[in-house]
Amino acid sequence: PLMIDGKGRMEARIPFGPFVVSDMPRKKSPARAAGIMINDQIVTLDSIKFQWYDEFQSYLMKNKEKPVRVGIIRDGRQEECIVTPSKEGTLGVFHNVENIFNLTQIDYNFFQAIPAGIAKGFKSIGDYVKQFRVIFSKENKGYESLGGFITMGKIFPDQWDWHAFWSLTALLSIILAVMNILPIPALDGGHVMFLIYEVVTGRKPSDKFLEYAQIVGMVLLLALLIYANGNDFIRYVLKK
């Protein structure tokens, strides 16, 4: 529930080591000021070894603006530096996660990309359908996280990224496709439902019934549109 409300998030728990300094800001870097250099490996804080990176961050937050002894390995030798973390609880260093995770890049040719894309599309559809039970859950209240045009705009990155843009565009297209086949009058799924009824019973629904069904379907869709964009508006006002 906290994640759905935007009060929490799920991230991969990153192992602490090896923490090899890959870069440092030119200014306002406590580590640079203390003499730590690029390619140094940070191993301890106040002689404490960490298994996970979030434990390292938590220790820095508890000791922000307080001197800590940073144990490093430089050229095979273990040394210590006294560093005072910033008020944000950081040392002012960056490390490359490629040293921690074994990343694999798979390249597809044109003919391999087609079945791979189809498989990914079906997986995305399956994942999206599974989310419906969360949306209608009274416990998780997923319906409160529904959003409209503002939410859709915010999921795109601030800077141009062609991969992210087309991936998100494809995801939105899949979402619209799934919505369109729902058995709601005024959508294609509603038309299919009436056709199935006609095939099974041998009778066509009356024109008056179809007219009322279309009206009900349009009212439901407009209500969903107003609700989703209303959520966006309320969240925007609350932030102000």
Image (cartoon, grey):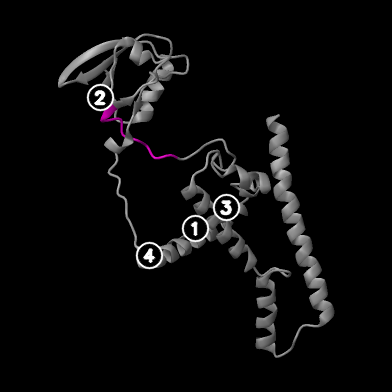
Q: Nearer the viewer, mark 3 or mark 4?
A: 4
Q: Quadrant of the N terminus?
A: top right
Residue 39 in the image: state x and y as whole percent: 25, 24
Whether residues under marks 1 and 3 lie with C-beta atoms below 8 angstroms apart, the answer is: no
**Distance (Cα) linking label 1 and label 3:** 12 Å
Q: Which one is earlier in the sequence, the residue at label 2 or at label 1? A: 2
Per the image, the residue denoted by label 4 is 110
Residue 100 visible here: no
Q: Give 51 or 112, whichever is nearer the viewer.
A: 112
Q: Gap in Å between the C-alphas at discs 1 and 4?
A: 26 Å
Circle 2 is placed at which residue position? 39
Q: Which mark is residue 134?
A: 3
In terms of secondary structure, where does tag 2 sit?
loop
The residue mark sitting in front, 2 or 3, is: 2
Q: Residues within 10 Å of mark 3 (few under 14, many from 20)?
A: some
* Mark 2: amino acid: Asn
| Foreground label between 1 and 3 | 1
Q: Mark 3 or mark 4: which comes first in sequence?
A: 4
Label 2 vs label 3: CA separation?
A: 46 Å
Residue occupying the far left of the picture: 76
